[in-house]
Image (cartoon, rainbow, N blue to C red):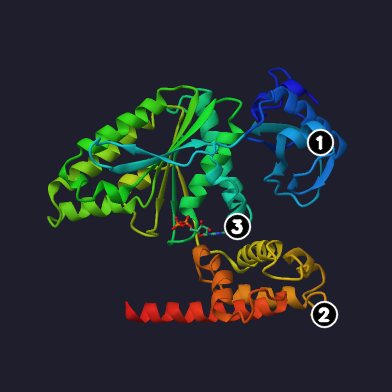
Amino acid sequence: MNGENMDVCWNQLQPGEDAAADRVDVHIEVLVKSESTVRRAEVRTHVLALLDRHSVIMGSYKWTEFDDEFLAKNVESVAVVDVDVHAPLDLKMNNLCVHIFSLNEDGPSTLNLEEEEELSAANHWLLPAAEFHGIWESLIYDEGIKTQLLDYVSTAVFFSDKNVNSNLVTWNRVVLLYGPPGTGKTSLCQALAQKLSIRMSGRYACGQFVEINSHSLFSKWFSESGKLVTKMFQKIQELIDDKEALVFVLIDEVESLTAARNASQAGTEPSDAIRVVNSVLTQLDQIKRYPNVVILTTSNVTEKIDLAFVDRADIKQYIGPPSANAIFNIYLSCLEELMKRQIIYPRQQLLNLEDLHTVGYIESEVTELSLHLQRIAKKSVGLSGRTLRKIPFLAHALYAKTSVLTLESFLDAMDKAVDQQKKEREKLANCV
Ligand code: ADP
């Protein structure tokens, strides 16, 4: 193992060096305790020794307890992440990319533009942020969606960093995630930025995340003119001017900008709304030229997103409601948490989908509860990720007869909670 080239994967292959045919980049995220002041090089040495001792792993893997005293004292976790293969993975035969980071515990600060009024045009985090930790893992989609998105954006940032002429090879760093509400688009943007700031930590000293509140741009204060937009982008520009910072700008629910523009064109909205929108678009065009900027946008509209935005985004990804399999895994993570907190007690083993497949989905004492969960997952199809994550809470609040439940009773309660949610949805749909 070459310890010097471990921080960023693309540095691993030196010019003139032959790429081993079937090597892949394996990413290892090392979370250093926030109070620790040890040098990264030292952490890396200990992590490489740990990996050397456990060289073959199955899929993603995380260590949180260590025999090594140094790691136990300074490191929270070592995780082999985003491994899509299910076959055994020999770490010695692949490129190890070790990313060492600690979390910024500070919550968001607001980018206030008017001193006398507490106007929050945007929230601002320093990455990697404690608040965003774990979001990536908690979002469950069909296989490939998250890693593909991550690969797209990593390549875009990498190409920019390498100064690839975009007139010759076309790409940009504008991402649009679109789909129904509650499918995790905003969270995915936060997680993506967090992930990239960790992956790129060998190249950029810090990550900045600015979330523009597009609703507030049209609030009563902002309707007066586009000047405040200019001020906000000036603040963002200050962040971009630091070449050592990778800056992510999130514009959530981008359709509210374009809706305002359309309303303005139809004469139902004052013309300064159009000024605000145009100002945002112009400013975005300005900042997207900088190689250290990634623009993330989301839209709840699945058709008819304003062309002005679609054209600006190179990376467009539809994010839909989870499939039955993804729902099963979302529920599994909820139940795991409730067992950990002893709200479901005693702890019982649930089989994952692969195990169920292996036993041919045949009902037995071992598979009974897992198959029940699978039936609940199947009938939950159509509910948004946001609703799904609430189902266990609703199950407990509405249908639990005792505060601590067995897994079997909890599944019965979840079953009822799903029926209730679906009824609510039907009622709502009939009202519209
Ligand atoms: P959107 O921006 O699409 O409206 P959010 O990012 O606000 O959605 O999602 C709200 C919450 O719903 C997330 O924080 C997450 O807890 C949950 N959620 C949504 N989709 C998923 C998913 N596919 N897997 C797991 N949780 C999800």
Query: How many C-alpha atoms fall within 10 Å of the one at disc 2: few (<14), some, or many (≥20)?
Result: few
Q: Nearer the viewer, residue 198 or 95?
A: 198
Q: Nearer the viewer, residue 68 or 184?
A: 68
Q: Earlier in the sequence, mark 2 or mark 3?
A: 3
Q: Position of residue 249 (x, y in %)?
A: 41, 39
Q: Earlier in the sequence, mark 1 or mark 3?
A: 1
Q: Where 358 sits versus 100, above or below?
A: below
**Which label belongs to residue 140?**
3
Q: Position of residue 270 (x, y in %)?
A: 13, 50
Examine the rendering and report whether any part of residue 13 can be seen: no
- At a point 68% along the width and 80% down the height, the residue shown is 409
Q: Position of residue 289 (x, y in %)?
A: 39, 28
Q: Quadrant of the C terminus?
A: bottom left
- Residue annotated with mark 1: 51
Q: Quadrant of the N terminus?
A: top right
Q: Where 337 sits versus 427, above or below?
A: above
In this picture, residue 52 sits left or right of residue 298:
right
Q: Nearer the viewer, residue 277 or 415?
A: 415
- Residue annotated with mark 2: 364
Number of marks present in the image shown: 3
User: Label 2 vs label 3: CA separation?
Assistant: 28 Å
User: Label 1 vs label 3: CA separation?
Assistant: 27 Å
**Which label belongs to residue 126?**
none
